[in-house]
Image (cartoon, coloured by chain):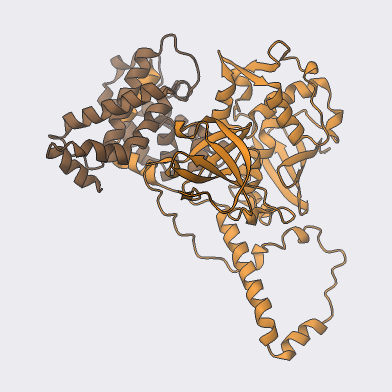
Chain colours: A orange, B brown
Amino acid sequence: MKQEKLLEALTGVGDDLLELAQNKRFPNPWRRWGKIAACLALVLCLTALALPYLPMGCGSAKSEAPMADTSGANEKADVTEEAAPAETPELPAEEPEAPVENDGGVEKTMTKFVVCGTYYYLQPQYATSLDEPPEELGEELGTVTSAALPELLGCTVYKEQNSAVFDRYAVDGQAVTQNVWVRTADGYVRAVTANEKIVSRYTFADVEQAVEDEDADWLLETFVRPLEEHGRGEIQFADASQLTADQLNRLVPAFAAMNMGVTVVDHWAEDGQLVIPVSDVRFRLERFLTGFTYEPEGTEAYDPARNAVILPREAADLDESVQLTLEDAVLSDANTLCLTVSRQDGVRREYVIRFDTDSWRYLQIREIAE
Amino acid sequence: MEDREIVDLYWAREEQALEETQSKYGAYCWRIAHNILRSREDSEECVNDTWLRAWNAMPPQRPAILSSFLGCITRNLSLDRYKAGRTGKRGGGQLPLALEELDYCLPGTQNVEQAVEEAELAQSVDRFLRSLPEKDCCIFLRRYWYVDSVLEIACRYHMAEGTVKSSLHRTRERLRVWLEQEGVG
């Protein structure tokens, strides 16, 4: 087969290129905004601490100054308060991340695993390992049922109390991404949820900026593309409980594909088909659709004998042929995101998405009349 | 231990070379094999075979980049094993998907062996990769050399899965054009 020859030809590429692909790290584009937010927070804290020591005139002048008229202020203002990057001096270019050491153990290997249907991953930069149980060991979540690294299979996973690393992604003051501890044969290793918690990538303060740069892709790929492709762009609702059976039939593969990645889709693969347990379908639909209760009997591809929805393997693929443009992204309140998207055929659609402490949901999808 | 010291151990015919290699590159090579074979036992055998090959190759060889040298051996062994055991194997794994994606990169329908020598093809692909932006090059190699899944690449390079897919799509298209211009196919 000619593809195999091409794959074999790749073996002959230069060692330096392989080393580059192995060790190169590209900075997380969202990190810079996190840093800016952190800097601003630091400035505010220092200012607050310094206030009692400032000359009275300065402090009183501020306190006695007439309040700025905020009536009619842009409703977006409240959502940008945590970072306000526009008023923060631009930071120097981010230093390249320290190269991660070569794979040499569980904690140094970027890998994924599944516990009770939720997807976690070990990231070398956060995968602290301890010989003893960590102080912040919380409730037991379950055991690893699927993992790229066999060493993780069967390991017990615990929540981390007072998870700190991702606190900056908090919604309403609560972290949306949870650190966990995996008890391995050698001790304890810290990992992080990844699956439905894709929200962790966003700090929200910079969502409007995202429209301007290449990170708009993230918003599109995460919230829009699966529905635009699998739903053929026809799915609209103001209330998910009003979805028709036909819409639901199209939503099932869309949600099967959503955020799952190739590995999890492979998990369902069986003889060229996807055999998705009803529990998995229900978990996703009910998580992403507000107030929705999934009953599989109305789904065309439902197989009662297996209590699973059976779809062609391609059902979860995204073909990238649908050209989407993110026209606008607005946070209408701290936790509600509104995306305006146009397709290549000129149809424009609005997605309203609500974030909460453990995930996000579609509140509404509607076509915008010309 | 530094790579140079490990290579010296091979040259001195010290069996400690194998222990050090296993310790430093065991997981790395295992992952390459497992991405292709999706079988723990087969992957472990491939990794053990890798150490044997390395033992036989050094001396006379003195690889400049030990990880790449070992990775190449593992990859070749894994691809051979994959081909040998492919018939009747179940689906799944990243390799069939990676192969499918590469299908149209080599234009034309004639047998590749008739069109170009493998070495020539490898050199052409190497030149092509060097012409790419660094990020696209890394993404392409992670997908088709290391046979990582799209999600793994996205995590590794802090990108959205869709962005990885777009990059791969773009690079495959460029490769097809490149190989056409180079007279392959």
Q: Is residue B66 left or right of residue A121?
A: left
- What residue is shown at x 44% (from left), y 54% (from top)? A97
Residue B48 makes an appearance in the image: yes
- Vertical placement of residue A365 versus A83, above or below: above
- What residue is shown at x 32% (from left), y 35% (from top)? B126
Please tell me which residue lies in front, B136 or A41.
Answer: A41
- What residue is shown at x 52% (from left), y 49% (from top)? A133
- Vertical placement of residue A43 versus A192, above or below: below
- Vertical placement of residue A299 versus A104, above or below: above
Residue A12 makes an appearance in the image: no
- What residue is shown at x 85% (from left), y 35% (from top)? A239
Give the percent coordinates (x, y) of residue A143: 57, 33
Q: Is residue A70 left or right of residue A155?
A: right
Please tell me which residue lies in front, B123 or A345.
Answer: B123
Quadrant of the image containing the N terminus of chain A: top left
Please tell me which residue lies in front, A82 or A141.
Answer: A141
